[in-house]
Image (cartoon, rainbow, N blue to C red):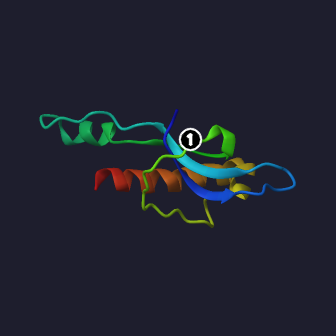
């Protein structure tokens, strides 16, 4: 499976999803291995992250003991954004920038 961060959880469910679910932001394609002898251009290309933003049923999630202190902008990354393709892409770009920033530091 892919690693993801829960952005917003919904324990009781909603009218359209009558089960416990969570909005998650995760990594579809991880950054590749980097060595000392690689050029800056190659390092920057290999440090890219391909993210996803999705709503998952709790039964399909497996929690871990790890915690990450990345806070996403709730105005950009939300369930309404997933309904519109342009907003979904904006949310994905926001998640990508946060994850790459965290990876580089």
Q: Is 78 positioned to the left or the right of 62 in the image?
A: right
Q: Quadrant of the C terminus?
A: bottom left
Which one is nearer the viewer's eye here, 54 or 41? 54
Counting from the top left corner in percent of width and height, residue 72 is at 52, 62
Q: Is residue 95 above or below residue 37?
A: below
Q: Nearer the viewer, residue 55 or 96?
A: 55
| Residue 23 appears left or right of 47 | right
Q: Residue at x 12, y 34 (%)?
A: 37
> Which residue lies at the image location 45% right of the left edge and 50% below the top edge?
65
Residue 57 seen in this snapshot:
no
The vertical placement of 94 against 43, above or below, is below
* Residue 36 visible in the current orientation: yes
Horizontal and vertical percent position of residue 47: 33, 42
Q: How many marks?
A: 1
| In this picture, residue 81 sits left or right of residue 77 | right
Give the labeled residue for mark 1. 62
Q: Quadrant of residue 101?
A: bottom left
The front one of 95 and 41 is: 95
* Residue 102: quadrant of the picture: bottom left
Up-down relation of residue 34 to residue 16 (above or below): above
Report the residue that reaches farthest toward the front.
65
Crowding around mark 1 (Cα neighbors within 10 Å: few <14, some 14 to 19, many 20+) is few
């Amino acid at each position: 499976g892919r690693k993801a961060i829960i952005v917003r959880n919904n324990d009781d469910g909603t009218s359209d999803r009558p089960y416990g679910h969570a909005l998650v932001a995760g990594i579809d394609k991880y950054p590749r291995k980097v060595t000392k002898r690689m050029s800056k251009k190659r390092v920057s290309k290999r440090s890219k992250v391909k993210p996803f933003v999705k709503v998952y049923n709790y039964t399909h999630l497996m929690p871990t003991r790890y915690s990450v202190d990345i806070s996403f902008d709730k105005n950009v990354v939300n369930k309404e954004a997933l309904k519109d393709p342009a907003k979904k892409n904006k949310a994905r770009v926001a998640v990508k920038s946060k994850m790459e920033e965290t990876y580089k530091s």
